[in-house]
DNA sequence: TTGAAAGCGCTAACAA
DNA sequence: TTGTTAGCGCTTTCAA
């Protein structure tokens, strides 16, 4: 009836080896010395029966599921698989599995995903979402599950923070253009002032300010985080009375849209229009000209997140929430 | 000490509501009538305590973990996230979570991932790998866990099969070129005769045979499944005494490499060389000219896989292994 | 309509 | 070096 085909239990192994279940347990996880002869008999029995410890039962007893939850908007967005891989790089060798939930950025789904993770007794949670407020994470904090938040700036009790240096990266991208003599630089931004995009605008403005350049609201356009949005935003900039000769885009996908806009206007890139992206997604090397961009190292972020979780789980870290900033790196290619 | 902050148990809820744990259980999962008044008291208690059923404990008792394992080579390859999403489309609403393991195509890692999934008591497994032999799946079959294999052709007891129509798709791609007057058509293939690539060669040859064209071994080059491999293979074809004017590539990544090869030789695409890809990855629309290709619908494959698993889990399906073939669709763009 | 009791497979006191 | 016992939180007979 049930889908399990009568799997051998620790008791069966014990009986076959002629020892107690306790001894089998200790032979397996070495928390207590077991004589070589006994261990051998146990191992033989395990092999003979094809025994595998039931992780659920172990988890129930130890209240550690050896699983961590990863809550993200959409695994289909190439940034997140990289993040997931980085997490696994660190957590896998430590014996943790990853349970992934997609939320599509919906706040209700985010909350329900968190609930389900808690119900599954995950040992830790990596939460990568924009629209979540501090109070949404309280259920996890209340039950004492370590949470690492990916992105955002909010420091919150019980929640470590990992994010890329959006502000510094955007500043560096802008400086790169300034150094090449571009005075009027446009910024193609996301729809609102939330999330990493906001930090990127801040960096852009900071770089201008360093050189004594005042911000020009006309040069900042708000549009969608998409290829079409990038094109529309860039066209808007190009339609200005004094259009910019260089643009910084909030991400690579939008920068590819900026490329589309240049092609439509018959502008050469970077000759007539220089374009900077952000993220260094795979596609950045597929378009022509290839995108000059800031590398946003998803895998490294995932690894940092994994280490943080591991430290909290082992009790190595127990202090107040930490903030880890992963630097972005300038990748010089052809578009700027 | 343990990382769980003293979570409320069903017993606590029962006490607060003034009923037995049994009643709380039934109030929650409705396997037995509970009076409206009692149910209300139970729900109130649950809300007051913030109770969430412990999925591990439930799983231990019912021997169903409500989790399914997804074993893939690499979540970083954009095909697999789509697959994972398709699985979740179907399995998520049914209350299943997904546990993902990356194997990097390593057979030992594949076997160990399978072992771990079994140890975790997953209710079903989706296995997407090339290098696995039939006997590697036996551990899962032995314990009665339904397995769906993604890709490959091997019909095996206890293992359902889902794959795209690699053979038919490649035949259609080839026919498309034949219809446009190309007589000598090259095929850029993977390193060996295994996996979906093999089926694609078969389809290519079948289409040629339909028109009475004999196979020419010179026109089939073996190379790596990568952009660099695609370029190298195409250059080899172009170096032939009578080079083909059209090539079919085993996947889009290789087709992008073929584009590189054409650019290097100064050939116009599709004027001097027509190029067909396979898969329709996102990048297919980013390159210039955009790739004409066969869409390999990963998400649909994932959904089909999820339905199959669900049928096996619910007992709806219980017969011999099934084979589901998802058709590939021709996407006309610019490269052919 | 409800409860009491047993037990899923494991580990951790405690005891020898 | 090893065993006995209890119990993690839940569901499921069996009984009322």
Image: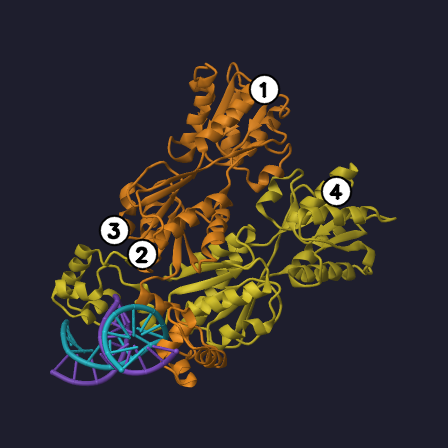
Chain colours: A orange, B yellow, C cyan, D purple
The residue lying at 39 percent from left, 55 percent from top is A68
Q: Which residue is mark 3?
A: A142
Cα separation, mark 3 vs mark 2, equals 10 Å
First reached walking from the N terminus: tag 3 or tag 1: 3
Relative height, residue B224 to residue A59 (above, below): above
Q: Quick check: can you spot residue B336?
A: no
- Camera-near label (1 vs 4) is 1
Q: State how far apart marks 1 and 4 are (Cα).
A: 33 Å
D10 displayed left or right of B290: left
- Residues at marks 1 and 2, common chain? yes
Q: Which residue is mark 4?
A: B261
Tag 4 secondary structure: helix
Tag nearer the camera, 3 or 2: 3
Mark 1 belongs to which subunit? A
Subunit of label 2: A
Q: Secondary structure at mark 2?
A: helix
Q: Earlier in the sequence, mark 1 or mark 2?
A: 2
- Whole-percent x, y for residue A191 in the image: 41, 32
| Circles 4 and 2: CB atoms closer than 8 Å | no
- Distance of mark 3 from mark 4, alpha carbons? 58 Å
Which image quadrant is residue A5 in?
bottom left
CA distance for labels 3 and 1: 52 Å
The answer to which of marks 3 and 2 sits earlier in the sequence is 2
In the image, are marks 1 and 4 on the same chain? no
Report x, y in % for residue A4: 41, 76
Rendered view: A231 above or below B257:
above
Disc 1 target residue: A180
Q: Is residue A126 left or right of residue B228?
A: left
Check disc 2 and report the residue beneath it: A118
Q: A249 or B305, which is in the foreground?
A: A249
Can you say which quadrant of the picture contains the N terminus of chain B? Answer: bottom left
Element type at mark 3: helix
């Amino acid at each position: 009836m049930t889908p399990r085909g009568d799997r051998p239990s620790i008791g069966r192994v014990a009986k076959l080896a002629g020892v107690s279940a306790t001894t089998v347990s200790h032979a397996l996880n070495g928390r207590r010395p077991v004589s070589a002869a006994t261990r051998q008999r146990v191992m033989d029995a395990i092999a003979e029966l094809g025994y595998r410890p039931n992780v659920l039962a172990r988890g129930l007893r130890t209240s550690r599921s050896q699983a961590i939850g990863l809550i993200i908007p959409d695994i289909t967005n190439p940034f997140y698989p990289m993040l997931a891989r980085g997490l696994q790089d660190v957590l896998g060798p430590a014996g943790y599995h990853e349970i992934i939930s997609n939320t599509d950025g919906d706040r209700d789904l985010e909350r329900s995903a968190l609930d389900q993770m808690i119900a599954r007794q995950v040992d830790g949670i990596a939460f990568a979402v924009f629209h979540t407020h501090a109070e949404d994470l309280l259920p996890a904090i209340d039950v004492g599950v370590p949470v690492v938040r990916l992105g955002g700036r909010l420091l919150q009790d019980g929640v470590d923070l990992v994010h890329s240096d959006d502000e510094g990266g955007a500043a560096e991208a802008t400086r790169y253009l300034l150094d090449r003599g571009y005075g009027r630089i446009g910024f193609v931004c996301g729809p609102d002032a939330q999330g990493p995009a906001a930090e990127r605008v801040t960096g852009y403005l900071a770089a201008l300010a360093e050189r004594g350049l005042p911000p020009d609201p006309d040069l900042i356009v708000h549009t969608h985080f998409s290829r079409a949005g990038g094109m529309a935003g860039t066209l808007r900039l190009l339609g200005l009375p004094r259009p910019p000769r260089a643009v910084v885009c909030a991400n690579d996908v939008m920068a590819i849209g900026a490329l589309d806009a240049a092609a439509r206007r018959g502008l050469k890139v970077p000759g007539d229009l220089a374009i900077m992206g952000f993220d260094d997604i795979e596609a950045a090397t597929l378009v022509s000209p290839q995108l000059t961009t800031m590398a946003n190292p998803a895998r490294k972020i995932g690894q940092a997140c994994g280490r943080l979780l591991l430290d909290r789980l082992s009790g190595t870290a127990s202090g107040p929430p930490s903030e880890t900033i992963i630097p972005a790196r300038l990748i010089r290619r052809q578009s700027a």
